[in-house]
Amino acid sequence: MTLRSYLWGMKISAALSFVACLMVIWYVDPIKSGLIGILLFYATTLLLLAALLVLFFTWMRRHFLEEEFSLAYLAASFRQGILLAIMAIALLLLQQFRMLTWWDSSLVVAGMLLVELYFLTRKN
């Protein structure tokens, strides 16, 4: 797969997840639908954030790295985008249950940093 086709696929998936997220926000009542509506909201938000963050990190690497951009950087962009999206969803869940405080959010951020450090330091 070429970089161009990967980026177009990611842009299309970001647009589709944006439409799905808007449809869930507009048409799903969380009180009437219960757990299913809440899960749909979090799933579509996770997909939207992940797609946007992967595109952002890919753009940052292409724009600011002096050397030629290769497909090897896509794995890091994908991993970091997914991790940040999971972190945002975890913070939203804590806020939903009214448990979000600064030390809880710093623990979530520290946990995601530890996961990223594991991937950066492991040997292939």
Image (cartoon, grey):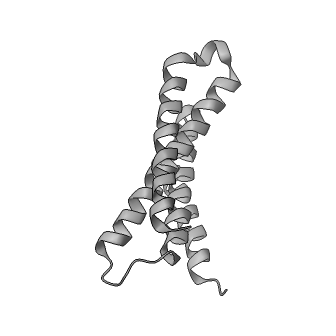
Q: Residue at x 67, y 17 (%)?
A: 33
x and y percent of residue 60 in the render?
Answer: 35, 66
Is residue 107 at least partly visible in the picture?
no
Is residue 61 at least partly visible in the picture?
yes
Q: Residue at x 37, y 82 (%)?
A: 68
Residue 75 figure quarter: bottom right
> How many numbered circles are shown?
0
x and y percent of residue 94 in the render?
Answer: 56, 40
Where the N terminus falls, by quadrant? bottom right
x and y percent of residue 2 in the render?
Answer: 51, 68
Point out the residue furthest to the right here: 35
Does 45 sit above or below residue 3?
above
Does 40 sit above or below residue 115?
above
Relative side of 60 to 118, left or right:
left
Residue 64 figure quarter: bottom left
x and y percent of residue 116 in the render?
Answer: 56, 70
Q: Which of 52 and 99 is in front in this view?
A: 52
Does 22 sit above or below residue 70?
above
Q: Which residue is drawn at 43% across and 57% down?
A: 55
Point out the residue furthest to the bottom here: 123
Q: Residue at x 39, y 58 (%)?
A: 56
Where the C terminus falls, by quadrant? bottom right
